[in-house]
Image (cartoon, rainbow, N blue to C red):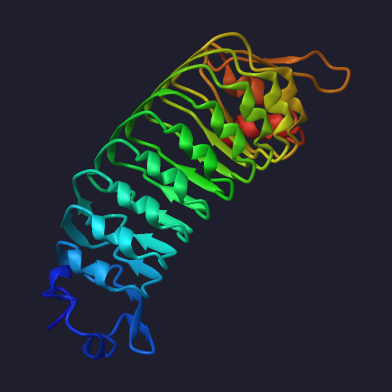
Amino acid sequence: ASASNDTADTLWIDAQQQCGWNNIACDSGSVTALSLEGIDLSGTISTDIGLLPGLQQAYFDHNYLFGTIPSEVGNLIKLNVFDVDHNALTGTIPKELGNLIKLVELDLDDNKLIGTIPTEFGLMINARELDLVHNQLSGPIPTEIGNLRNIAVLELTANNISGTLPTQLGELTKLQQLKLGNNSFTGSIPNEMKDMTSLSTIDLRENSLTGSIPSEIGLMTNLTEIRLEGNDFTGTIPVEVTSLQQLRILTFDCDMLLEIHQDSESPISFNECEDLKGNCIACRMENNLCRALCSSLW
């Protein structure tokens, strides 16, 4: 049968037959990888997936799968990649995924998942990438997220996740990309985030965050992108931002102010409610902040 006529429910027959199929890798008769991405696969993911104890990589992304993620996936203790993004999966995220202590990459983005992020995610201590973007998740970020000391990418954009940003985020010292935009977060940016010195991207736009931008942001010297617009921050952008020599993108609400000093010249006061383009003309592009603020205009 062609891939478009197969369903995920018909994939599990016996080891010998499975190992002869395209898109399936085996080792000594044991299925180790399912590379089923983008082949117009429809149907549901069978609970029998839990009967593949040697499975290390499962790619189901960019298909037409629906139904829930079976809890039996949590039986796959050798699994290091589970990718089901860009499908139509529903229901909650099974807490049993926390059993996957060898998991490096979890991609659940662009589905219709509901409920909260399981606290059991804190058990996935080898995780490096966690992508839950564009679902319908709610509730807070569990404090157990601070256990993921190896994580480099945490993407939760475009859900309805709420509550305050947990101080435990500051324990993710290897994190490079933090994308939390378009959610319902409240409260202030925790000072503990100053320890996240590996960050290159921090995206907090379109939430309900309050308070001032911590001056400690200047300690995150690897930052290339900061997105803050669409919140209720007060005060000015801290002058410490001027120390971020690698910064390329900086966005913030137009009622906030940032002063850029250029040698002995008068400082330029950036306020996006006013003449941003005029300020950009006055701002020398060799200045890293000028580039970050004006890159969209040139």
Q: Is residue 144 left or right of residue 55?
A: right
Q: Against 80, is 204 above or below?
A: above
Question: Foreground residue, 138 or 95?
Answer: 95
Question: Foreground residue, 197 or 93?
Answer: 93
**Residue 274 position by quadrant:** top right
Residue 144: x and y, percent? 47, 37
Question: Foreground residue, 186 or 13?
Answer: 13
Q: Against 10, is 89 above or below?
A: above
Q: Against 107, is 195 above or below?
A: above
Residue 237: x and y, percent? 64, 17
**Total residue callouts:** 0
Residue 101 in sight: yes
Quadrant occupied by the N terminus: bottom left
Q: In the orientation shown, which residue stands out farthest toward the top? A: 235
Residue 189: x and y, percent? 55, 21
**Residue 19 position by quadrant:** bottom left
Q: In the orientation shown, which residue stands out farthest toward the right? A: 264
Q: Is residue 226 left or right of residue 267?
A: left
Residue drawn 62% across and 13% down? 257
Residue 271: x and y, percent? 59, 14
Question: Foreground residue, 27 or 203?
Answer: 27
Quadrant occupied by the C terminus: top right
Residue drawn 28% across and 68% down? 38
Residue 107 in sight: no
Q: Against 21, is 173 above or below?
A: above
Q: Is residue 49 left or right of residue 224?
A: left
